[in-house]
Amino acid sequence: MDRFQYLVGELNKSSLKTKLSECLSLPVRSTDFSISHRGAPRGYPEHSREGYLAAIEMGAGLVECDAVLTKDRELVCRHSECDLHRTTNVLKTELASQCNAPFEPWKPGSRATARCCTSDLTLRQFKSLCARSDRVNDRATSVEEYLVDKTPMKGTPNVRCGTLQTHRESIRLISEHGRKHIPELKVMNAQTLRVLNLSVEQYADMLLSEYRSLDISPDRVFLQSFSWDVIEYWLGHYPQYAKNVVFLDGRGRNPSFRSSQPNMESLYEKGLRIIAPPIPMLLEMNEQGALQETRYASHALAAGLDLITWTFESGLSDIPGFSKTESDRVWVLHALRDEAKVRGVFSDWPNTVTRYANCMNL
């Protein structure tokens, strides 16, 4: 039994369950509603060739590479500049000596730690590593204990040495399979950029230059950033890409943030067309216990902004009071489409979103 079948089977009797049950035998077809988040990290090492190929097979219409720089100013796919100690085997190699901070074992009162960055290594060194699932034991007294192997998801291969990808390699792979690109320019440490002799704007230019050099149509590239300064730079300097620029909206992390119609209209007037907040910013419980769109969603849609959201299948949704079982995820997905009117959903396991979208003809 696959995951989508399992989730649908666990739903209580409803018209939604009946509808989705009728679609279980449909073949998977690609849809832009389904967006691959770092590949398919629920079952594969994130940002690995194996994970990207799995996401493509699952029907993700857009595939994400989070882009950061190596020591020799090459763009590679990693979720952050300094996660190599968790997401690769670098600590088990001679390159561990080049890490920003060496492995320190657990001791009472402190966790096991390390810090290894893409900017610590050249591209050649980076490519010599294996991608691994992001799972560590912070009570470890040795590197072997620290790098805990993740039990593979049922029905997926146990990828012990995933293939790391450069940004350029990811572009070629995604293009070869006819999918669209949704790269995120990750925030890099200001000191790192100074050492690399780059401004933020030059860093943003480098990302775009790789699509331009490979002759990728702007219509197939959805540029992302959490930095409004970077978003404004792209909107102002690359008008041909503007309609697909995605503002990853993390403002909700600030407890004092309040959505407003004038703010959303201001973003639209500045040229933004797509905004992407986390799922709990878009849905809330009503008095009857059902999900409805939030004021944030209403404001964005009324301003003319399209909505993309993150991240499905990364854990139970934290919409206050709603999610109690795994199958509730299906109701969240349904409400994102029916109530919040999203155009796409990032997922750590794209198959679920794809098959829902296929059933609803999205």
Image (cartoon, helix red, strand yellow):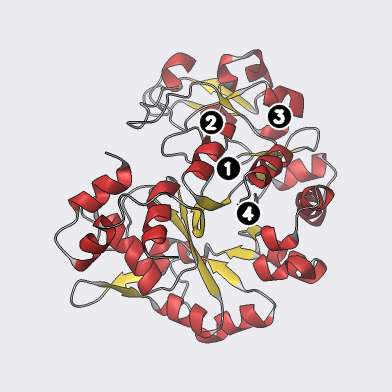
Mark 3 is surrounded, within 10 Å at the Cα level, by few (under 14), some (14 to 19) or many (20 or more) other residues, namely many
Q: Which amino acid does label 1 sit on?
A: His
C-alpha distance separating marks 4 and 2: 25 Å
Residue 300 in sight from this viewpoint: yes
Q: Amino acid type of disc 4?
A: Lys
- Pair 2/3: label in front: 2
Mark 2 / mark 1, whichever is N-terminal? 1
How many angstroms separate mark 3 from mark 4 (CA)? 30 Å
- At label 1, counting other C-alpha atoms closer than 10 Å, the crowd grade (few under 14, some 14-19, many 20 or more) is many
Up the image or down, 178 lies above or below 248; here it is above
Q: Mark 3: which amino acid?
A: Asp
Mark closest to the chain's N terminus, 3 or 1: 1
Mark earlier in primary sequence (1, 4): 1
Task: Answer with left or right where residue 347 lies relative to residue 196.
Answer: left
Between discs 2 and 3, the one toward the N terminus: 2
Which residue: 56% across, 80% down? 264
User: Which residue does the numbered mark 1 point to in the structure image?
Assistant: 79
- Residue holding disc 2: 87
Identify residue for label 4: 180
- Asked if labels 1 and 2 touch by Cβ distance under 8 angstroms, the answer is yes
Q: Which mark is residue 120?
A: 3
